[in-house]
Amino acid sequence: MDLDRVLASKCRTRIIRVLAKNGNLNVMELTQKTNSTYNQINSHLRVLLEEGIIFDKHYGRLRVITLYRDNPKTALLLQALRILETPVDSKQPGRK
């Protein structure tokens, strides 16, 4: 997995976080929940699909996006995002 590529965009990390919290969502729901445009979401979904972080299913014209949780890389990515969201203790050595 190209971690730099996946995390290079705030929109991609928002997509991952929204999917982790909400489960399966269609593209329009993702667009609304990430406050992005349809074209932006589609562009970022392509990257996440190529990296194996998500998968999609088509139900007629409806496209549903799901985190590929069985992929160990996705689990590590989610764990890394949780760690990065944890507030830093101001009493750590080297911190003022």
Image: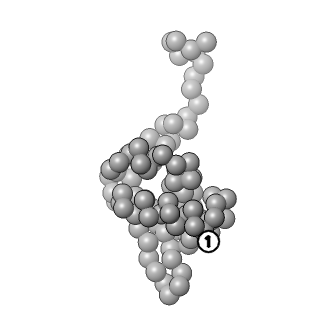
What residue is drawn where x is 44% and y is 72%?
56
Compared with 59, 42 (above or below) is above
Q: At which x and y percent is residue 18?
A: 57, 57
Q: At which x and y percent is residue 21?
A: 56, 56
Left or right: 80 in relation to 14: left
Q: Identify which residue, 86 or 16, lies in the foreground.
A: 16
| Rendering quarter of residue 15 | bottom right
Compared with 35, 75 (above or below) is above
Q: At which x and y percent is residue 23?
A: 52, 64
What residue is drawn where x is 56% and y is 26%?
88
Residue type at numbered disc 1: Met
Left or right: 33 in relation to 16: right
What residue is drawn where x is 47% and y is 46%?
7
How was the colour assigned to the protein in this rendering? one colour
What residue is drawn where x is 50% and y is 87%?
60
Q: Residues within 10 Å of mark 1 (few under 14, many from 20)?
A: some
Residue at the disc numbered 1: 28
- In what quadrant of the picture does the C terminus appear? top right
